[in-house]
Amino acid sequence: MTDKKHKAARVGIALSRFAMLVLLSTSFAANGQQTDQPEAPRSLPSEKIEQLNDRRNQVAIDRSAISKLEARVATADADRLPIFNARLDQAWFDLLTNIQHYAKTVSDEKNAGFIVDNYSEDAIALLARQRANAEILFARLKDRAALPASDASVSDEAAAYERLFKVLKRNTAVVAVFIDSLETARSFEVDASEDELALTAAIQEFAINLSVFLELSVNNIAEVRAGAAVLPEDTDIRARLAIAEARVRKTAQALEGLLTQMKRLDLDTSRYQQQLLTATGTITTDAFNFTVLQNLILDWSDSLVNQLAENGPTLVVRFIFFLLIIVVFRWLARIAEKLVRRGLSSNKVQVSQLLERMIISTAGSIIVVMGFLIALSQIGFSLGPLLAGLGIAGFVLGFALQDSLSNFASGLLILFYRPFDVGDLVEAGGVFGKINHMSLVNTTFLTLDNQTIILPNSLIWGGVIKNVTAQKERRVDLIFGIAYSDDIPKTEQVLQEIIESHEKVLKDPEPMVKLHELGESSVNFVVRPWVLSDDYWDVYWDITRTVKMRFDEENISIPFPQRDVHLFTQTAHADTKLESAQKSDTRPAQQTNAADVNSDEQD
C-alpha cells in the first residue's frame, strides 16, 4: 500500500508540473503575439487638432488675400502698381509656405501614430496644387526680373539691380519650398515624379541664366576697371565700378544659393562651381570637389596648349621678357635690402638683429613675388585663377600646418618683445646656448660644447626664457667653508685680498665677503664679486683655484664631512654582566651558575 501511495504522489506531482508548463507556454505565446502587433492608432489630442485647423485656416486666409490683391492690381494706377505687385508676390509665397507647413505637420502626426485620415486627404490635395502655385509665382518673378536701361543713371542702375537681386533671392526661396513640398508628398506615398521633372527643368534653366549673367557681369567689371584706370578721379566711373563689383558678388551669391537646392535634387553642379571659383575666387568646401579641380586644371592646360599653337613666336618673346622682369626685380630686391639694412643700421632706429634680418629678407621677398606675378601677367597668364588656386592651397596648408602657424605667431611675438638677440646666452625650452639664428618658425641655438639645436618658437615663447647675457654685469656667487677652530677675521681678510686683486672683478658694485652660516661641520663664507657677463666663468674658476691655494698657504683648513663609527660586540657585553653578577651573589655555587646561565639567555 505504501508503494502505491508513493507512485500516486509522484504521478500527481508530474501532472501538476506539466500543467504549469502548459500555462507558462500559453502566457509567453500570448505576450509574444501582443508584442508583434503594431501599436493601435491614437486619436489626435485637442491641442493638435487646433494647431492643424489653424494651419489649414491660414491657407484659406492666404487664398483670400491673393484674390483681393489681384483685384487691386487690376485697378491700381502706375504709382501704386509696384507696391501691390510686391504684396501679391509675398502672398503667393506665403501660400506656398503655409501649404508646405500644414502638409508637413499632418505627415509628422501620421508618422507619430495619430489618426489623421481627413487631414491627410486635404494635405495631399493641397500639395497637388503646389506646382501650379509655384509656376504662377515663377512667371510673376520672371516679369519683374528686368535689367536697367543702357542709358540709366548711376542711381537708377543701382536701384534696378537691387530690385533684380531681390527677385533672384525670392526665386531661390520658391525653389526651396517646392523641393520641401515634393519631399512631404513622398511621405504620403504620392508619386511626385512629374512635378520633380518640371522643377528640375526650371532650375536648370534658371542656373543657365544666372551663369550667363555672371559671365556678363565679370566682363562688365573688367571694362569698367579699364575705364577707371584711365580716369581714376572720375566719380561716375568709380560709382559704376562699385555697382559692377556688387553685381558680380550678388550674382555669385544667387548662383551659389541655387546650387545648394540643385544638390538636394542630385543635379551636377561642378561646372557652375568652377565658374564661381574662377569668377570670384571665393573658396568653399565645394572647391575641393575632384571634378571642379579637374576642370580647372584641364581649362588651364587647354589654354596653355592653345597659346603655344597660335602664338608660338610671340610667346618666345614674352618668355624672354618674363626672364628679364624676373632678373630686374631680383636686382631691385637686392637694392631694397641694402637700403633697408642701411636705414635700420642708423642710430635713430633701435631694433634687434633678429627683427632686422626678418625685415630685410621680407622686403626682398615681397619685391621678388611682385615681380613674379607681373611677369606672369605679361606672358598672358590670368592671375585670378592662379590666386584662387593659391588660396585653396593656403586653406589646405592652414589646416595641415597648425603647429607651424603657432610657431609663426610665437616668432612674431619674440621679434616684437625682443627677449633675446643674436649672440645672447639663453636658456629656454630646456636648451642652454647662444642664439645663432632665428626665423619666424624656429630658433637655432649653439650650445657651449658647439652643438647646433633647432627649437620651435612655440616651445620658447610658451615657457620661461632666461637670458644670461641680457645684462652687461653679473654677480658671481661663491661659498667657502672653514673649520670651527680657524681664525675668522684672518679668513675674511684673505678672501677680501683675493677678490680685490683679481683684475676682472669690478670695483662698482663693490664685492662682498660675509660670514654666511654656521654649518654642521664648517663655518661658511659667501663671496660675491661683480664681473662683466663675458668674464663670469673666468672669474669663477680663478677665484676658486686661488682660494684653495691661499688657504693651504695660510694654514686655513677646508673641512669635509666626517663620521665616527662605534662598534660593540655581544660577547664582551655578556662577560661584563657575568662578572658583575658573581661579585654580588651570595648563593651557593650551583645556584649561582644557574642564575648566570639564565642571565646569559636573557641577554
Image (cartoon, rainbow, N blue to C red):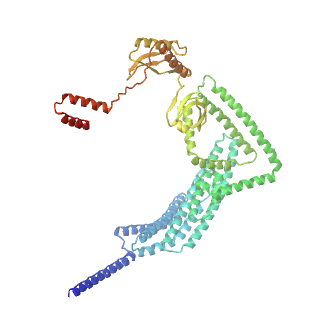
Residue 410 position in % (x across, y down) = 54, 37
Which residue is painted at 77% across and 41% down in the image? 323
State left or right for residue 546 relative to residue 16.
Answer: right
Which residue is painted at 28% across and 84% down in the image? 15
Q: 59 and 361: which one is in front?
A: 361
Quadrant holding the N terminus: bottom left
| Residue 512 versus residue 574 in the image, above or below | above
Q: 412 and 425: which one is in front?
A: 425
Image quadrant in which you'd find residue 57: bottom left
State left or right for residue 48 relative to residue 476.
Answer: left
Residue placed farthest to the right in the image?
313
Quadrant holding the C terminus: top left
Residue 25 position in % (x across, y down) = 34, 80
| Residue 229 versus residue 39 in the image, above or below | above
Which residue is painted at 46% across and 12% down in the image? 554
Q: 512 and 366: which one is in front?
A: 512
Residue 477 position in % (x across, y down) = 47, 21
Image mark count: 0
Image quadrant in which you'd find residue 271: bottom right
Residue 68 can be seen, yes or no: no
Residue 305 position in % (x across, y down) = 77, 54
Image quadrant in which you'd find residue 322: top right
Residue 369 can be seen, yes or no: yes
